[in-house]
Structure formats: structure tokens, C-alpha cells
Amino acid sequence: MSQLQLATWPEVETYLARSTGIIIPIGSTEQHGPNGLIGTDALTAEMVARAVGETVGALVAPTISVGMAQHHLGFPGSITLRPSTLMAVIVDHVASLARHGFDRFFFVNGHGGNIATTTAAFSEIYAERSLHPAGNRPGVRCKLRNWWEGPETEALCKTLYGDALGSHATPSEVAMTWHGFPHAIKHATMAPRIAPTGAFHDADDYRSRFPDGRIGSDPTLATAADGARILDIATREVAADYRAFVQEA
Ligand code: NI
């Protein structure tokens, strides 16, 4: 058993007797350049989270598929939650599951734009519990893990793509979706081959700086076979971090 949505409540009750940890995939629904799928960040986070759940025998919650992506709204199909909305979504997920006895919340993240908001939501959760006279009991802990950040995962992506990895619509995340969803593979020509890099502000500013949506990447380098390798190594690294998180004192 690994997906919460495919479990029954008695199965969850039985699970809670042996573990109070849960994995929550969190992604985004936003443009990913000319050949990347709108769901890339949600799909990749879910792939890694489910593979980790199978590896470590942990429950995996439904994916939070829409994140904080205001800067992508210049491109059709992108959806954002306001930071305040996403914080409320995260706080309510944790509060609901904490009521049942879960106390280790491991968010597998697929979108850099979620990081600030998600960690602010964790601070909100801790603040509410720390301000309570009884303190944080039972001791709820939350952790955010970006699937791409393990040292071996980063090294593999650098080896495969070098300077064309970039930071948005990367060949690595595109490769992961090609492995997971081969029926949805798209091809497009990229001009320039490697997209520009730099900072940005709002959605209009983003679109004017990065006209086709990519930042620093050449996603035509993606292959489904690369995606399988990246998923495998990311799963191993994220699984190790999950085990350490649920075992920490
Ligand atoms: Ni992405």
C-alpha cells in the first residue's frame, strides 16, 4: 500500500500503528516552454513521491498539483494559487492528517516557486503550535525536499546536460515526463538553442525576458531513457532523506 487514495480507512489506521510519517507530493500547473508539459512539476513530484513510497513503505497523499506560479501566468494554461491560498492549503492538509496521528510530513516538491511559500506555511504551523500553552504535542514536523537536489541527482543531470540544464523547463524534468508519459511526448524547435537566464518579477516581466518560457535550458536534449535514470537516482536519494526524517530524534 502506498497511495492514500487507494487505501481504506482501516488500512490507514493499521498503517498509523507502525508509522506516523506521510509523503505529500507538491507541484505546479504552469508552462514549461515549447515542448514541456503544463503538468511537469506536479507529474515529476508525484513520480518521485510514489516511487519513494513504494521503496520505504510509506503512505503518499494526493498530489497538491497547483502551486505558486504567478510568474508563469503570461502563458496560456498556467494556474496559480496566491501564496496565502497555498499556505492555507498546506496548513489544512497537515492539520487534517495530524488529527489522525500523523506527525512527520515530508513534502516532495517539484517546483522552485513553491519553496518560499511552503516553508512559510511550515512556520505558520509551528507558530500556531508553539503559541499554544500545551506546545507542539504531538510533535508535528514538516520537511520540504526538492526532488532534484540530491548530490547524485544533480551530478547526473550536470553530466547529461551540462550548461544546457538551465533552471526552468529543464531537459531533466522534461525527460522525467517523457519516461512517465510517453504518449504525451512533444517536439519543438528552440531558438536560441539555450534560453537566456536571469531574474524576473511578475508574469508580464517574465514573458518579456523569457519569450518562449524557458530559462537557461535546452529541453530538446531530453530522452525518456535519461528520465528513467534520473527518476531512479532521485528516488534513492529522496528515500534516504525520508528515512532519516522519520527516524530523527
Ligand atoms: Ni518545472
Image (cartoon, rainbow, N blue to C red):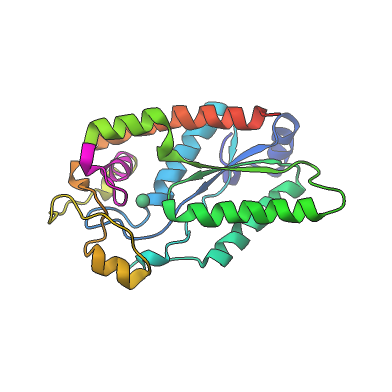
* Residue nearest the observer in this picture, 198 or 191: 198
Magenta stretch: includes residue 158: no
Q: Residue at x 65, y 53 (%)?
A: 123
Q: Position of residue 122 (x, y in %)?
A: 63, 51
Which residue extends farthest front? 199
Q: Position of residue 59 (x, y in %)?
A: 60, 37
Q: Is residue 74 visible?
A: no
Asked if 5 appears above or below 55 in the picture, the reply is below
Q: Position of residue 212 (x, y in %)?
A: 22, 62
Asked if 221 appears above or below 56 in the picture, the reply is below
The image quadrant where one finds the C terminus is: top right
Res 84 → quadrant: bottom right
The image quadrant where one finds the N terminus is: top right
Q: Residue at x 40, y 30 (%)?
A: 151
* Residue nearest the observer in this picture, 134 or 188: 134
Q: Residue at x 43, y 47 (%)?
A: 110
Which residue extends farthest right? 133
| Count of all numbered marks drawn on residues in the image | 0
Magenta stretch: includes residue 163: yes
Q: Magenta segment range?
A: 162-179
